[in-house]
Amino acid sequence: MKTLREYIQEAEEKKVAIGHFNVANLEMLWGVFNVAREVNVPVIIGVSEGERDFVGLRQAVALIQSLYEEFNHPVFLNADHSYSFERVKEAIDAGFDMAIFDGAKLSFEENIKITKQCVEYAREKGGKTLIEGELGYIGEGSNLKEKLPEGAELKTKPEEAEKFANETGVDLFAPSVGNIHGIVKGGNPYIDAELVKEIRKSAGVPLVLHGGSGITDVDFTKAIEAGISIIHISTELRLAYQKALKFSLQEAPEELAPYKILKPAMLAVQKAVENRLKLFNRVG
C-alpha cells in the first residue's frame, strides 16, 4: 500500500483532498472508517491531546493498525494539535503517521525552533511520521461559537510561510486563510482561495486546512483547487454525535445496552463523514 506522503501527493495531482476526522471513541472511529471504505478513499483519523489521553496513545495506534490489517484500506493516524515537543515525541515513538506541533501562540522564532526540533526527531526515527507546522491564528476549541473570536482576521503571510517551511523542514503546513476552529453561529468566515494559492507556492509543501466544520461547499471546492490537500473536520462530528445520542436516550429511556444506545450516534457520524468525503473527493 502507498504511504501517506504518496496519497497526499496523489491528492494534489488530482485536485482532491484527504478527509481528516477527529474521533474520541470506537463508535466515532467506525463511523468514519465505514464511509471511507464505502467511498473507497484514504482517510486520516485525528486524535487531539485530550482525545488521545482518553482513548490511549498506544491503543489508538493499535486500533488503526487493526483496521488496516483486517480491511487492507488506507487509514492513517494523526496526533492532532500537540502543544509541546514532548507530546509530538511520544506520538512519533508510538508509531503515529502524522503529528502537528501547534506553536501558533508562540513567537515566530520559538514556533520555528520547536517545530524544527520535532522534524529532526522524526527524521532520526526513520521519517515515518510526517510533521506538520502551523502559523497564523486559527483559534481553539471544536465547539459552537457565538461570534468570531478576536484575531480571526489575522491571516498567514506568504513570505512568513516560506521562511517557516524553509527553516523547519516541515512535511506539511497549516495556514490561517479565513478558517476558524469550531462552528460560528452567525456563519464561518470565507476562505481566501487566492491566499491559499500564494502560500502553497511560497511554502513549497502540501497544505492542511484546519477548522473545516462550518465552511461552505463552495469554499471547500475553491480551497482544494487552490492547493489544500488535507481538510480537518471535528465539530460537525461532535454535533452529529451529541444530537443523535440525546435522541436515542429520549426515545428508549429504558434501554441499557450501550451498543444499542450508541448505534444511532455512530450512524449520525457516518452520515456527516459521507457528505464531506464525497465533496472532498469529487464523488457523485
Image (cartoon, helix red, strand yellow):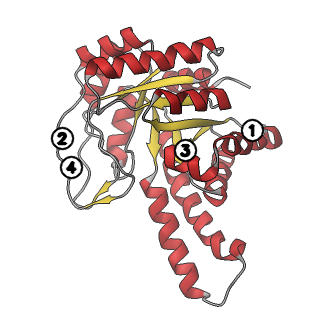
* Cα–Cα gap, marks 3 and 2: 25 Å
- Determine whether the residue tagged by mark 2 lies in a helix, strand or loop: loop
Q: Residue at x 61, y 65 (%)?
A: 267
Q: Is residue 70 visible?
A: yes
Q: Amino acid at mark 1?
A: Gln
User: Is 68 situated above or below 264?
Assistant: above
Nearer to me, 212 or 274: 212
Please give the residue where the numbered disc 3 appears in the rendered image: 47
Q: Identify the mark at residue 151; answer none if there is no mark.
A: 2
Q: Earlier in the sequence, mark 3 or mark 2?
A: 3
Please give the residue where the numbered disc 4 appears in the rendered image: 149
Q: Amino acid at mark 2?
A: Gly
Please give the residue where the numbered disc 1 appears in the rendered image: 65
Q: Amino acid at mark 4?
A: Pro
User: Which residue reaches farthest right?
Assistant: 70
x, y (%) of residue 94? 67, 32
Callout 2–callout 4 Cβ contact below 8 Å? yes
Q: Is residue 177 left or right of residue 264?
A: left
Q: Residue at x 49, y 20 (%)?
A: 118
Callout 4–callout 3 Cβ contact below 8 Å? no
- Determine whether the residue tagged by mark 1 lies in a helix, strand or loop: helix
